[in-house]
Image (cartoon, coloured by chain):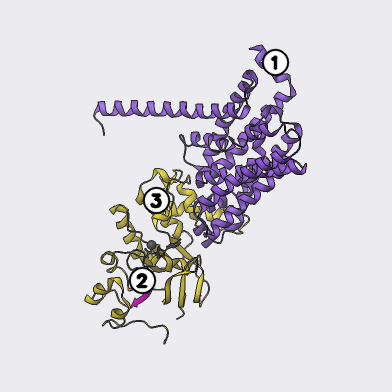
Amino acid sequence: MKPLVKLENVTTGYHSEPVLKNVDLEVFTDDFVGVIGPNGGGKTTLVKVILGVLPVFSGKVSFPGQKPQMGYLPQISQIDKSFPITVRELVASGLKTQHPFWPSLGKKQKAQLSDMLEQARLTHLASRPIGELSGGQVQKAMLCRALISRPDLLILDEPNTFVDKVFEQDLYRWLQELKKEMAILLISHDIGTISPMVKTIACVNGNLHYHPSNQLTEDILKVYNCPVDIIAHGPVPHRVLKDH
Amino acid sequence: MSEFFSILEYSFFRNALAAAFLTSILSAMVGTYIVSRKIVFITGGVTHASFGGIGMAYFLGMSPLLGAAVFAVLSATGIEWMSQKGKVREDSAIAILWSLGMALGIIFVFMTPGYTPNLLSFLFGNILSVGRSELYIMLGFAIVVALVFVIYFRPVVQTAFDPEFSKIMGVPVLFFRYLMATIIALAIVVSIRSVGIILVLSLFTIPQITAMLFTRSFARIIPFAALWGITGSVLGLFSSYVFNIPSGAAIIFFLTLQFLLVKLVIVLRDSLLRGRNSAVGQH
Ligand SMILES: Nc1ncnc2c1ncn2[C@@H]1O[C@H](COP(=O)(O)OP(=O)(O)O)[C@@H](O)[C@H]1O
Ligand SMILES: [Mg+2]
């Protein structure tokens, strides 16, 4: 089986300053990867290089099959909640238009949009600007924006910070369904909450260490900060991409 | 009162009214983008940079507005380019641009032999002297901008709100960002004649902020801002004529007055509602 995304020895960062070094990772169609690591460890940087919005300094990011459709829920702190955009406009911005220079929505897409809003129970809020919504409602709308194009790979960047418990429960219920249809990359700095859900765990702290299980072993906890040498000798087998 | 309306018979006054309408509608569209993206300071930098172009054009004996347009477009797209690169701290770069533009303008005007009578009207605006050809330029440009906003509403709003996500969705982000930078620059230059360099920024922000007291949806801010812009600038225009004061200052005065009055009404209404609610014991 070909992976959806393949990172080989990737080094990336900002303004030629490397943040992530020599990262190897493969994400397959039925994967549910939990990405953990300390603040500033490079979790967001990792997803941005997968999404193609950050330059690859060295190494290679490839899509061995057809280029997958990616759905992205950015970290809430990246979003300007005071921006005057309505829920409907926000969710619709997740739809690809027929042509980049002819941006109107077709009939089918409009139906898709109202379906999505209906499913998420956001219809009654559709015309409301996001500034009038609760944090959880904004997150939900942003999740709809990521899902509306039926992605092959769903990337969620810390969806469980600063939001209400109601959204969090909704989210986890949704993820149980969604994981049957798409690959998921779920970032969190909270290993405890996500580990029961995910299949595998990637620990990111300047480098990336992949654990092909979701077990919270003593060692994984100990290496929560992912020091290189400890993890390389942990009892958990590692998926080593370099040697295949 | 009849004397008040008799001034409508003068063509210069009708031109001024038309200019007030057109700049209000133009700045309603462009200003909503500016306020939404929180790039008011950048817009100020571009405005003042354009003064360098005015001075240079004077010195070279060319059209001042053409000089302003060249400087404004270059600085607006330059700032967009810098922010794409992310290498320069944006605010300090803009401060340099801001003051350098003014300095160049002053130097060139100073070096230009003879008296430069129109200079004050560029700094403070003189809507009462807007001519027919300038009106046509305003009209043409307002139509172009309106078309861009109608046809490209989705990508314009989307690339302003979340350029990174737009890029992932395959939207030509750079194209729309540079297009909007150019539109902002030209909209400023076209409005300079009405309110002047020093005050043009207010035309692109105060009606929008007033509108945002009622709505926080991009599409709905624009007509509200146009309305507030028109009432403020028509009031300013009349008082500019009646009291013989600079039109720009008069217009901005009324735009601000409107904002303060509306804000006051809203604050009073809210405190009344709150008072009633707590009296009933709700909440
Ligand atoms: N836009 C940026 N420009 C420069 N440095 C950045 C930028 N974004 C993140 N960084 C740096 O990259 C490192 C990793 O950040 P990030 O990927 O956001 O970490 P995480 O998501 O794990 O908290 C941090 O040291 C941060 O300071
Ligand atoms: Mg992050």
Quick one: which residue is furthest to the left in this view?
A218
Question: In the rendered structure, are the residues bearing label 2 and label 1 in contact, judged by CB atoms less than 8 Å apart?
Answer: no
Residue B151 position, x and y percent, is 62, 48
Taking the spot 76% from the left edge, 34% from the top edge, the residue there is B114
Q: Residue A3's quadrant in the figure?
A: bottom left
A209 drawn magenta? yes
The residue lying furthest to the top in this view is B2
Q: How far separated are the C-alphas under marks 1 and 3? A: 55 Å
Q: Which residue is mark 3?
A: A138
Nearest-to-viewer mark from 1 and 3: 1
**Residue A214 image-quadrant placement:** bottom left
The purple chain is: B
Q: Secondary structure at mark 3?
A: helix
Query: Rounded to the nearest whole Å, what is the CA distance between mark 3 and mark 2?
Result: 27 Å
Amino acid at pointer 3:
Val
Vertical comparison of B159 with B269: above or below? below
- Residue farthest to the bottom, as pictured: A243
Q: Which residues are magenta?
A: A201-210
Classed neighbour count for the residue bearing mark 1: other residues with Cα under 10 Å, few (<14), some (14–19), many (≥20): few
User: According to the image, label 1 marks what residue?
Assistant: B6
Q: Dividing the image into 4 quarters, which one contains the C terminus of chain B?
A: top left
Q: Is mark 2 within 8 Å of ligand 1?
A: yes
Quick check: A218 left or right of B180? left
Quarter residue B234 falls in: top right
Residues marked 3 and 2, same chain: yes
Mark 2, residue position:
A204
Q: Is residue B103 visible?
A: yes
The colour with which the image depicts chain A is: yellow
Would you say the residues marked 1 and 3 are in contact, meaning their CB atoms lie under 8 Å apart?
no
What kind of element bears circle 1? helix
Looking at the picture, tell me which residue is in the foreground, A28 or A38. A38
Where ligand 1 lies, by image quadrant?
bottom left
